[in-house]
Image (cartoon, rainbow, N blue to C red):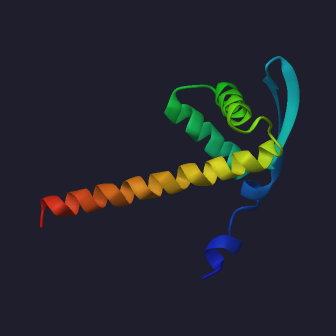
Amino acid sequence: MCEIYSGAEPELFELKTRSIRIDGVVTSIRLEAIFWQLIEEIAEDAGISVAVFLTRIYHEVIARHGKVSNFASLLRVACTTWLNQGKRLVLRQAEDHSLLFD
């Protein structure tokens, strides 16, 4: 069972650091390569750049909680939430499709 996890390509969990600018301030974010790939997909699906996506999520967290305590962790959770929503959407579409043919 664990082969699907332990067999992941090392490049996917290699840490990558990117510099981004939020509100004119340059900061570095260090994430595993797979999370950068997912962030790029999320931004592309939304029709925005990665920089705009990161800035928006940063501002939303500030508006909601008043601060961002661990932005990198927040981004990892955002990625897994996005993946889970996609999974639920696929399941919902499959259920809707099966209802049509029952």
Q: Nearer the viewer, residue 65 or 79?
A: 65
Quarter of the image with the N terminus is bottom right
Number of numbered discs overlaid on the protein picture: 0
Q: Examine the rendering and report whether any part of residue 32 can be seen.
A: no
Q: Examine the rendering and report whether any part of residue 30 can be seen.
A: yes
Quarter of the image with the C terminus is bottom left
Give the vertical position of 10 relative to 42 (above or below): below
Q: Nearer the viewer, residue 96 or 48?
A: 96
Give the vertical position of 52 relative to 35 (above or below): above
x, y percent for residue 21: 81, 23
Residue at (71%, 45%) from the top-left corner? Answer: 75
Q: Is residue 2 left or right of residue 91?
A: right
Q: Is residue 43 left or right of residue 92?
A: right
Give the vertical position of 101 relative to 56 (above or below): below
Residue at (22%, 58%) from the top-left corner? Answer: 97
Q: Is residue 12 left or right of residue 45?
A: right
The quarter of the picture where residue 63 lies is: top right
Give the vertical position of 72 relative to 23 (above or below): below
Residue at (67%, 52%) from the top-left corner? Answer: 77
x, y percent for residue 99: 17, 62
Q: Nearer the viewer, residue 100 or 57?
A: 57
Q: Is residue 61 left or right of residue 23?
A: left
Considering every residue shown, the one lying at the far top of the view is: 24
Residue at (52%, 56%) from the top-left corner? Answer: 84
x, y percent for residue 101: 12, 63
The quarter of the picture where residue 24 lies is: top right
